Image: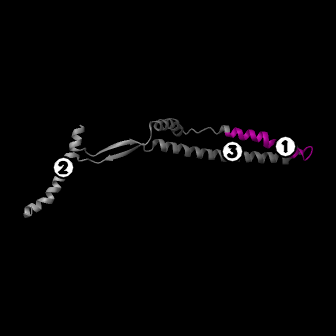
Amino acid sequence: MALREFLLGKPAQTEQISRFTPEQQQALSQLLSFTLPKVTTGQQFDFAPIEQQARSGFEQKTIPSIAERFTSMGQGAQGSSAFGQQLGAAGAGLEEALASQKQQFGLQQQGMLQNLLGMGLGQRFDTLYRPETGGLLGGLGGIASQTAGTFLPLLLRGLL
């Protein structure tokens, strides 16, 4: 086959070349096997630990801080309606902040999943085009035809 290609050349051909190394392909496959079920079933990453941490911080820091401020006002200040209003406002602020963070968390998660899917489902191969080659005989034929094209008119006119 090699001698034939040397003499006659090779036809034009296309070849697909992977854009990724085998290790990268394996990593993409693992990402897809993790990501696709989450996307198709609508599952999300768990926000509960973040929410729990915020609620624990509220209970351990915010409520005692408000209580301490009202205690410094004197006996019975914690029984006032102002104390309840402060706790209620702080709780509402916590819930509002958590709702906002949860929404942002979901949007970030969606963007991340879309990026992973884009990488995993995107084009994994490039196509390489190799033009035909003439080989030795094709090259000699081209030289012969050029030579004949140059000298034939001169021969016909009798200049040689």
Q: Closer to the observer: label 2 or label 3? A: 2
Q: Along the polypeptide, which appears first: circle 3 or circle 1?
A: 1
Which residue sits at x=75%, y=40%? Answer: 57
What is the chief secondary structure element of the magenta stretch?
helix
Check the image and report above or below for 145 versus 72. Answer: below
Q: Which residues are magenta?
A: 50-76
Instruction: Determine whether label 3 and label 1 are within 8 Å by CB.
Output: no
Residue tagged by mark 1? Answer: 67
Q: Is residue 62 magenta?
A: yes
Which residue sits at x=48%, y=45%? Answer: 118
Instruction: Determine whether label 2 and label 3 are within 8 Å by CB.
Output: no
**Secondary structure beneath disc 3?**
helix
Residue tagged by mark 2? Answer: 140
In the image, taking residue 149 as reference, residue 47 lies left or right, namely: right
Residue 49 falls in which quadrant of the image?
Answer: top right
Q: Find residue 154 and report its horizontal and vertical position in percent.
A: 11, 62
Estimate how packed mark 3 is, as few (under 14), some (14 to 19) or many (20 or more) residues with alpha carbons within 10 Å. Answer: some
Residue type highlighted by circle 3: Leu
Q: Find residue 83 and report its horizontal and vertical position in percent.
A: 84, 46
